[in-house]
Amino acid sequence: MKKIIVSTIFCSSVLCTVWAAAPDRTAVSKNVLLLCIDDLRPELNCFGATHIHSPNIDGLAAQGRSFHHHYVNAPSCGPSRYSMLTGRYPVKGRGNEHLRERAEMVTEDPNSEPPSMPEWFRENGYTTVSVGKVSHYPGGRCGRGWADESIPEVPNAWDRHLMPVGEWENPIGAMHGYANGKKRIKGDEDYVFESVEGPDTIYPDGLIAEEGLKQLEELASGDQPFFLAIGLIKPHLPFGAPQEYLDLYDGVEFSSIPHAAKPKGITTWHGSGEFMGYNRWGKDPRKDHEFALEVRKHYAACVSYADKHVGDILAKLKETGVDKNTIIVLWGDHGWHLGEHGIWGKHCLFEEALRSPLIVYYPDIGKAGQKSDAIVETVDVFPTLCDLTGLETPEFAKGISLRPMLEEPSLAGHESIAFWTGKQTIRTDRYRLVVHPTSAVELYDHTTPEKETLNIASKYPDLVADLKKQLSAKMEP
């Protein structure tokens, strides 16, 4: 029997009075469908990775606008989703605490924090529903098993929080779930990848997608505009997907891993602790090329598994008829290293950890299918959705609307910044600067073949100083 954790959260009237614009239901009409995919790097066919089978995401890109230089504001689930859901930078850069700490402040004082993006839409006439992993914890709750209904991770945001957990019993079990209800136990049976024969529902994402379809159908039949967010877990570790998705990569040639060596000097390199903590049968992909290829194929299988669910959701949207009035955003919460810089994971400030897919579609979009190479960042999602739906854009949202690039894909973007464990980075259309707490700096030129393998900071002190000023300016309240 399918088990679902669900709660209904009601908004604080004080908070609504202080922060939210007065609802104008006559002006609100466009729906929002937000698809969040965990650990999805831009290794998709529509982003140039021709060895990847991703026909449904490719189809969305062909109808909308894919942003090929979208960067997240932190290389980890929690702070990245904080920036997406609040439109503000995760300046603390201390792992996954941002949303939980914000929730604690709002619970103690409803006026202490501006409303989140879903709360903003909710107070402006939208029915808001989340399914799966939209905030850091699947289902959006803190506490034991990430299942305490009294501790919402994003207070006042959702009319309904849903997280199907099935045989995995609770959200934390589903987050790292293996096939058929097996949970991670931090032991020898915690394999870094697996593939098992069976339907989509043998892994948690199959249940999340099913519930997402049910909610979409219900919302489409309602008389209010909706903001529906569906969060898929794969391709997050462990890399597990039904066998049919791994079979897609039989005989498929994968290119060699670019700049696979561990970098020299001071960088944000790390030893891939999350990945290395799994049972790898004594193998190390940094030394074993055949094993590295196996890992990459299992990651690709998870991408194709997620793509299947995206296809099912988009098909249901069209079946309901509300596709004609719905804005779709597909967003990856950060990138993921598959051996680049000698890293298997995220949690660093290299390009591969910070660059992720962003695709936006709305009916009658101009120049459909043309990509944008503009530098954009995750905090731009909030103001973009306000602009496209006709809602007032709140002053506290730090990003900018991407509507100009959606109308004309050749337009330039703006600098992107990110944070991690006290370190900061800024990415322009040419350079990446990384600033360490020790005052050490990394400067890379993306117009050169070396890209982020050659630190040129010592040669260009004036450029470093200028980029530091740009970084500080973007961080200002």
Image (cartoon, rainbow, N blue to C red):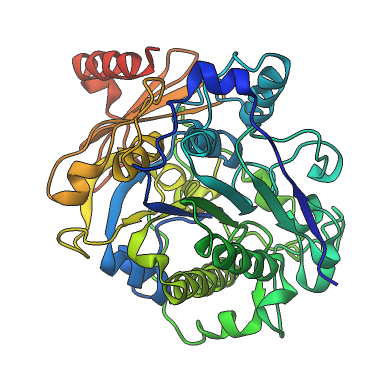
Give the number of marks: 0
Residue drawn at x 77%, y 33% is 151
> Measuring 48% from the left and 46% from the top, which residue is drawn there?
334
Q: Is residue 403 left or right of residue 124?
A: left
Q: Nearer the viewer, residue 232 or 188?
A: 232
Q: Nearer the viewer, residue 386 or 463?
A: 386
Residue 402 placement (x, y as % from top left): 26, 41
Q: Residue at x 86, y 59 (%)?
A: 169
> Does residue 98 sit above or below 192 in this rendering?
above
Quadrant where the C terminus sits is top left
Q: Residue at x 56, y 40 (%)?
A: 76
**Res 260 visible:** no
Q: Is residue 443 above or below residue 208?
A: above
Picture quarter containing residue 387? top left
Q: Which quarter of the image is occupied by the N terminus? A: bottom right
Image coords of residue 25 (percent x, y): 42, 41
How far across and down, in percent of the image, does residue 26 sit?
36, 43
Foreground pick, 430 / 4 = 4
Question: In the figure, is residue 163 to the left or right of 53?
Answer: right
Residue 424 appears left or right of 303 = left
* Picture quadrant of residue 210: bottom right
Residue 62, visible in the rendered structure: yes
Measured as percent of width and height from the top left, residue 288 is found at: 59, 65
Position of 23 relative to 137 (above/below): above
